[in-house]
Amino acid sequence: MQSHDQSAVLLSYSAPTVMTSAGRYAHLLDGMPGGIGELADIGQGLVIHEHLADAYGVTLSAEDRATLHLRQVEKLLGAIVARDDRPLQVARTPAERTAGNCRHFAVLMTAMLRAQGRPARARCGFGNYFPSERNEDHWVCEYWEPAERRWILVDAQIDERQRAWFPIDFNVTDVPRDRFVVAGQAWERCRAGNADPSTFGLSGINEAGDWWIAGNLMRDAQALLNLEMLPWDGWGAMPGPDDPITDDLAALFDKLAALTQSPDANLAELRRLCDTDDRLRVTEKVHNAARGVYEPVLAD
């Protein structure tokens, strides 16, 4: 790729977009530190993972869990300051934190970096550093390091406690590419017979398979196009557990997997494909599988 093309790609990830804009709370991101670890620490002091709350001694109510469905960082920040209006750099106790999941940590981290004009994007795929035999459904942030001229994965969810709980033997601000596998790579490996689709999913609800990989592949593609959907949002041709993946659909996912594994070189083609193919294009309303309803992507 020519340097001016790379510059254009980086520019597209350097400013807040619809999901990563802090909106009326933009001033809260002023004066944030520049260190990746420091930014991750801030997010960890604001958000508590829905599936790990019990381990922090917190029981989430149904009302608490409503924030899991917030797609936009502006609304997430609104929920955070409604609970506690101190500066974001002040870590809340676990009980004072706002409920979220890996996607919220990743998108909040992306928003903080973009607020500083630094290229960053959320990625959807699978982590193999959790206490299960599966490649677990997961989101991380990917940021551009100009000194090294490469994209680096940072898991903004993993705090000091979680590093002790999980089998992590690497720096979570530079996650190895074989420990977090983007969805396109998972799809390609399984198609080639080099991985078992039944090992990719979410062990907490005992779901896995090629359909789960395909769903994350579509979510990762949209995240690369600056539309970071919820982990349970469904639209278009995204298959369910009982839906067959036809040869035509598999071919489409093959193409999407190739494009999302080299997004910088293929960003224009990825956008064209996702904007013009009804099987991939995000509609005004999507199916929130967790709630069992269709709802607008951008709520009022």
Image: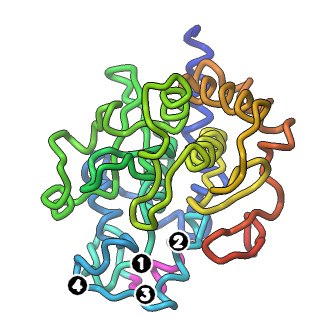
Near-viewer residue (147 or 124):
124
The chief SS type of the magenta part is helix
| Residue linked to disc 2 | 76
- Alpha carbon of mark 2 to alpha carbon of mark 3: how far? 11 Å
The reply to whether callout 4 and callout 1 are in contact (CB within 8 Å) is: no
- Alpha carbon of mark 3 to alpha carbon of mark 4: how far? 18 Å
Amino acid residing under circle 2? Leu
Q: Is residue 15 left or right of residue 141?
A: right
Q: Tell me the residue at 79%/50% (across/down).
A: 236
In primary-sequence order, the first of circles 4 and 1 is: 4
Tag of residue 57: 4
Q: Position of residue 190 (x, y in %)?
A: 51, 31
Amino acid residing under circle 4? Gly
| Residue linked to disc 3 | 83
- Alpha carbon of mark 3 to alpha carbon of mark 1: how far? 8 Å
In primary-sequence order, the first of circles 1 and 2 is: 2
